[in-house]
Amino acid sequence: MKNELIVKTKPKSVISEDIRTIRTNLDFSLSEFDKKVVMVTSSLPSEGKTFISSNLAVTLAENGNKVLLVDCDLRRGRLHRLFGVSNEQGLSNLISKYDKDIDLAEYIRKTDMSKLIVLTRGAVPPNPSELLSSPKFKAIIEAFKKHFDYIVLDSAPVNGLPDALILSKVSDKVVIVAKYESTTIDALEDTKKALENVDANIAGVVINSIPRSKTKYGYYYYGEKE
């Protein structure tokens, strides 16, 4: 799984440079915010949102920022496998047990990058959407803002689930991931409309898996025009 962290394993690759370009564009769009919360989502499963969110978090940490990467896909999240850390106590457990005196350090996991910390998904709960919409989750994000420059939320896909729409309420910017020749225009439009209906602040769309024969970039970032 760790080979998916391509920014670390192949830092000089074209794909790694593409992701750093996404980071730069996103960082510019977030310049007005002090503490920056970014949600990464997609229309459907298997479109690359976890790949993008994890590599984006790595590049942000490389740039000297203290970064918390949170697995908010409480159904299928796999950040614990990607980073090779324990999932025994994660986000779902933290929300369930949260109070103002809780020790947040018990739930976060260090990585081999000093600036990058991971909060895994935890046990799969029977009520993911209810946990994410609870006041406790918002309080947790506010508490973590005191300790990190960036918080990157790896969300469940938008279509068919309310999770990403709920998470957008605590996010400063939303990045939508689409897969070349897999994500349909209709699905992408539905995702965009659903997020706009809850006043989400969409930063742009990352289209991944573009063949090199089609473009010199494997990833294309389309930012929202003012």
Image: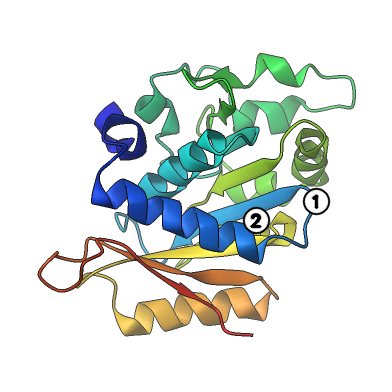
Q: Amino acid at mark 1?
A: Asp
Question: 190 or 180: nearer the eye?
Answer: 180
Mark 1 vs mark 2: in front? 1
Q: Is residue 36 above or below residue 54?
A: below
Q: Is residue 221 above or below residue 171?
A: below
Residue at 80%, 51% in the rendered image: 34
Residue at 77%, 62% in the rendered image: 32
Residue hosting label 1: 34
Rounded to the nearest angstrom, the CA distance separating label 1 from label 2 is: 19 Å
Please say whether residue 61 is visible from this viewpoint.
Answer: yes
Quarter of the image for the C terminus: give it.
bottom right
Question: 104 or 55: nearer the eye?
Answer: 55
Q: Quadrant of residue 179?
A: bottom left
Would residue 189 be found to the left or right of residue 130 on screen? Answer: left
Q: Quadrant of residue 144?
A: top right
**Cβ–Cβ below 8 Å for labels 1 and 2?**
no
Of the image marks 1 and 2, the number of the one nearer the N terminus: 1
Q: Amino acid at mark 2?
A: Leu
Instruction: Tell me the SS state at disc 2.
Output: helix
Would residue 184 be found to the left or right of residue 87 on screen? Answer: left
Would residue 148 be found to the left or right of residue 2 on screen? Answer: right
Instruction: Tell me the SS state at disc 1.
Output: loop
Q: Which mark is residue 167?
A: 2
Q: Is residue 61 above or below residue 102?
A: below
Where is residue 152 shown, x and y percent of the image? 58, 45
Where is residue 92 shown, x and y percent of the image? 61, 32
Q: Which mark is residue 85?
A: none
Furthest-right residue in this view = 100
Please say whether residue 1 is visible from this viewpoint.
Answer: no
Quarter of the image for the N terminus: give it.
top left
Where is residue 209 shown, x and y percent of the image? 22, 60
